[in-house]
Image (cartoon, rainbow, N blue to C red):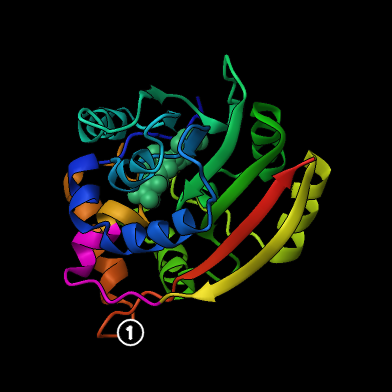
Amino acid sequence: MPDRPTDWDATAYDRVADPQEEWGREVLERLDLRGDETVLDAGCGSGRVTRLLAERLPRGRLIAIDASASMVAMARQALADSPCRSVHVLEADLGSLELAERVDAVFSNATFHWLLNHTSLFERLAAVLIPGGRLEAQWGGEGNVAEFTRAVESLLGDERFAPYMRNATRPWNFASIADTEDRLRVAGFEVDRIWTEDRPVTPADPQAYLRAVGFGSVLRDVPAEVADRFVAAVTGSMTQPLVLDYVRINVSAGRL
Ligand SMILES: C[S@@+](CC[C@H](N)C(=O)[O-])C[C@H]1O[C@@H](n2cnc3c(N)ncnc32)[C@H](O)[C@@H]1O
């Protein structure tokens, strides 16, 4: 597992992840399924979107993987009465993914920007897919939440926070279309379509949202009162009312 903390606050995430569910539904619509396939959800989180994928696989198999123990526990609950014939939710790092069986398709939503090495991520995904298998994914692309990342970086050196922030330096990998396409090809994918879209989000409670989603697991080993003050300082330094300038990168690809 990576050196950085991997656990999220699954309850807090699940409460505010409406934008992620909306985006995930759209990625799911791109996945052409008969209903009897084996599909991997790479980074299932609390299971809000995985449950929708399970409904598309009544005669199939669903493998859901996440590196966060609390997310895995919540996803297991979310999928407990799933209509899918076979569901396995596993705690594992996608960066060193190995599966006992190959899958027909990989679905992923709002996850890949949390892995710093996309070369090895795409290699691992290619290794678990059958030839001709599909990859339908969306995550944070180049320029994603730029005002937020600038605000974080400008506060990392602040003496109130610096001693606690060793894991907060560039935890995100918001890669460009060109780099992503190259890496996918090298890993053995044929890229049918790759594109970005702007998806601005105005959170009802910016601090709660950024703490649970934007920072993910980044502040999990920081004392709670320091983390609260850091999130408040980041939020307060951004343009008000706060709008998160999300840029999503989408990939529709096939395993050669
Ligand atoms: C923003 S959430 C998205 C969850 C879900 N796909 C959704 O749409 O709600 C990102 C998820 O990626 C997971 N993640 C981050 N890095 C990971 C890694 N290296 N391996 C597996 N999961 C990872 C996190 O634990 C978190 O649950």
Q: Where is residue 135 in the image (x, y as percent from the top left)?
A: 62, 46
Q: How crowded is mark 1: few (under 14 residues within 10 Å), some or many (20 or more)?
A: few
Q: Is residue 96 above or below residue 167?
A: above
Q: Where is residue 230 in the image (x, y as percent from the top left)?
A: 28, 59
Residue 218 visible in image = no
Is 220 positioned to the left or the right of 132 in the image? left
Q: Residue at coordinates 58% horizontally, 59% vertically from top-left? A: 174
Q: Quadrant of residue 208?
A: bottom left
Q: Residue at coordinates 44% horizontally, 39% vertically from top-left? A: 43
The count of marks equals 1
* Mark 1: secondary structure: loop
Q: Position of residue 178 (x, y in %)?
A: 76, 64
Q: Is residue 135 above or below residue 63?
A: below
Residue 133 visible in image = yes
In the displayed image of the protein, which residue is found farthest to the bottom? 240
Q: In this view, does 103 lie above or below 216?
A: above
Q: Quadrant of residue 199?
A: bottom left
Q: Where is residue 62 in the image (x, y as percent from the top left)?
A: 43, 30
| 20, 12: nearer the viewer | 20
Q: Residue 201: say if magenta.
A: yes
Q: Residue at coordinates 18% horizontally, 43% vertically from top-left? A: 11
Which residues fall within the magenta stretch? 200-210
Is 96 positioned to the left or the right of 43 in the image? right
Q: Is residue 230 above or below residue 217?
A: below
Q: Which residue type does callout 1 highlight? A: Thr
Is 75 positioned to the left or the right of 173 in the image? left
Q: Name the residue carrying label 1.
A: 239
